[in-house]
Image (cartoon, coloured by chain):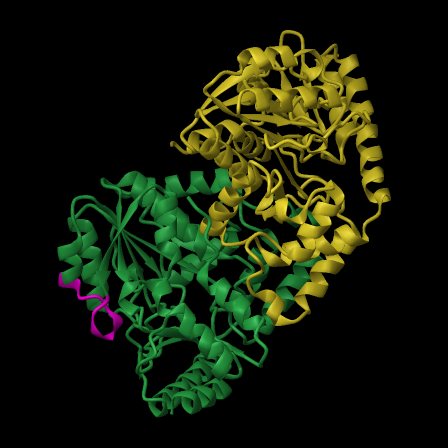
Chain colours: A green, B yellow
Amino acid sequence: MEYETPQFFRVMRYASQADRDVVDMVSGSPDWEPPESLREGLVEYAQGDTERFQYPPSVGLTGLREEIADRRAVDREQVVVTNGAGEANHLAMSAGFEQFPGSEMLLVDPTYPYYAGRASLLGADTRYVPAGRGGVPDTATVRDCTREETSVIVVNTPNNPLGATYDRETMAALVDIAADYDALLVSDEVYDHFDYSGRFSSALSFDSPHRVVTNSFSKSLAITGWRVGYAVFPDREGPRGDLFDHARTRHMLTNVTSSRPAQAAVLHALRETGPDYYENVRDRLRGRIDTFTDALDTAGATYTDPDGGFYVMARFPGFPGTFENVERLVDEAGVAGMPGEAFGDSRADWIRFALVSPRVETAADRLAEFFG
Amino acid sequence: MEYETPQFFRVMRYASQADRDVVDMVSGSPDWEPPESLREGLVEYAQGDTERFQYPPSVGLTGLREEIADRRAVDREQVVVTNGAGEANHLAMSAGFEQFPGSEMLLVDPTYPYYAGRASLLGADTRYVPAGRGGVPDTATVRDCTREETSVIVVNTPNNPLGATYDRETMAALVDIAADYDALLVSDEVYDHFDYSGRFSSALSFDSPHRVVTNSFSKSLAITGWRVGYAVFPDREGPRGDLFDHARTRHMLTNVTSSRPAQAAVLHALRETGPDYYENVRDRLRGRIDTFTDALDTAGATYTDPDGGFYVMARFPGFPGTFENVERLVDEAGVAGMPGEAFGDSRADWIRFALVSPRVETAADRLAEFFG
């Protein structure tokens, strides 16, 4: 595999080297505060017994697995705590390719770019099914695109980059398709706390040996750098208990375990943080979405109005979302977004903006002026 | 790959369920304090700016890479910060199998058990070369055992379980063998701060595109659960710059990056901790080794007198190191060690004791009494 500098990194570098002030809306790192109890949890850990500085169980601190299991209404034994959703995703995909027939992954276009990279690392090919209107793939089309070679289907809800939230009917159909084709549905739900539609439906709502859910606290607790994620595998006693076993072995042999200070602080924060924290963040983001999409109206752009997550994709008339145009926007408007082509051919005309800056209003004004 | 409960875990569980008091000398988790500055570093991080809670560079915090590079006299660009030595080792091996001809690993018997598991995960076979007298493999024998199919040679110095420290001549020969067979020497040096012989020689002393060094702060800072390790790859501009690229891609696609709180605290501790800290720990361990080996003399045992690390292997007359005998030692002597067979056939008669308990003296007395 060739190493490629991720495109978001190229854009961020370009933006940071610009001669003018630029609002960075490139990467998805939250700019808001984590809950205060998270800091407390880390301080408490730092001052605690040194026995707690040594190896936790490979699959994660027992208390943290329990807390996750309670929240997701699953058995603790189904949960592996991972080094962020990245590793959770890697373990789930790898278990799918290993334990199900075929060596092909089905992905929705446009998509978060790392999924295909992970499949390639594992020696698998990727096929794409188009996201339909509103960003949710038409499940009949997904079924048409699924075939014998398909071993893993990866979806992301709420979705990056489209902001779509998959409803219960869609998730049910996706789980059924995976079952019908003896494949594994991997549902990446890292934006589950950012659903504005009330329609979010986890793949865990469906008791099936054909689905794994991956998640993390990177976005919900505003700590992308802490690397605490998890995967929930099918029932250990059921027909696909082997998926958990595969992931556990791979996790042990590659990472041994995930970093304990971060696990301990996240556990403390989960116990101490009420629904208000998440609601406040959602309110703030909804406000930003309104501000930003109003400006896009003024700019004459077409855009996605997200049901979830914190990304808006926009298409400006006569201004396709190429790398060159994104650079032009940095230099001439002072706003940095991500070229749509980074997410797949289908959105090459678009630009993605991450609403994780306190200066969304400034960015909105600048875009309205530049295009207006 | 089948999941197997690691043997050390089985023994620890057995010991913890015993009816009597047992001194746990099974796993290698330090029982001493980390430097005070490590705790300080974590508290400072917890109270710091939330921007620092977000993604660090995938290959690690720049300051930490610089600190490591300075200490190892290499270029920062050769360093990847990993989720402990486990991941460093996995990345190094995987780069070796990918970039060098052959798909076979050469390992010294006895050995730390995870290496072979990692090779198997990567689809490679393992051959063994016997550790010679004193625990250092005879380099002529290593050369004889190396062949065209060999792509990776893994050594561990100072050594677990034998306590041998490989000297400069041995390391030079190993690097040469790797070069002659177009293979990669992976030198796992996690016990480098625990050399009592003064003869430790890192593979980094030899400028070669055929060696990678893996290491971590798990043992040197007494934080096995924090997962901060690193790998040093050959010169990026040299003929094997591709090894770094391979590792960086795999690291990015599997872990994205390593946990930042732990990285930040380790960086602070490295800057603030003087040589006294390490010297004091070595002194304490040397004292424990003396106490323990004196008791083994009384018990009539044959044993390894470690030049480095904190393990002692012992063979008791008429009492081979089977799992059953290890259980008997738990029940009848109140001392828990690791069965030698866990480290390879060559030491099936032996038992390994980790001197990471403040009760080494009690354990020594008990063994002397049981066997004396």
Q: Quadrant of the C terminus of chain A?
A: bottom left
Front residue of this view, candidates A63 and A123? A123
Q: Is residue A363 left or right of residue A236?
A: right
- In which image quadrant can residue B204 be found? top right
Q: Quadrant of the N terminus of chain A?
A: top left
How far across and how far down the image is residue B100, in percent?
48, 29
Q: Is residue B104 above or below residue A299?
A: above
Q: Is residue A256 above or below residue A88?
A: above
Front residue of this view, candidates A308 and A37? A308
Q: Is residue A99 above or below residue A74?
A: above
The answer to whether residue A330 of the structure is visible from this angle is yes
Q: Is residue B328 left or right of residue A342?
A: right
Q: Which residues are magenta?
A: A131-140
How far across and how far down the image is residue A29, in percent?
51, 69
How far across and how far down the image is residue A93, in percent?
34, 48
Residue depicted at 51% across the width and 45% down the height: B245
The answer to whether residue A82 of the structure is visible from this angle is no
Task: Residue A136: say if magenta.
Answer: yes
How far across and how far down the image is residue A148, in percent?
16, 44
Front residue of this view, candidates A73 and B275? B275
Task: Residue A291: say if magenta.
Answer: no
Q: Is residue A318 left or right of residue B165?
A: left
Q: Is residue A347 left or right of residue A356?
A: left
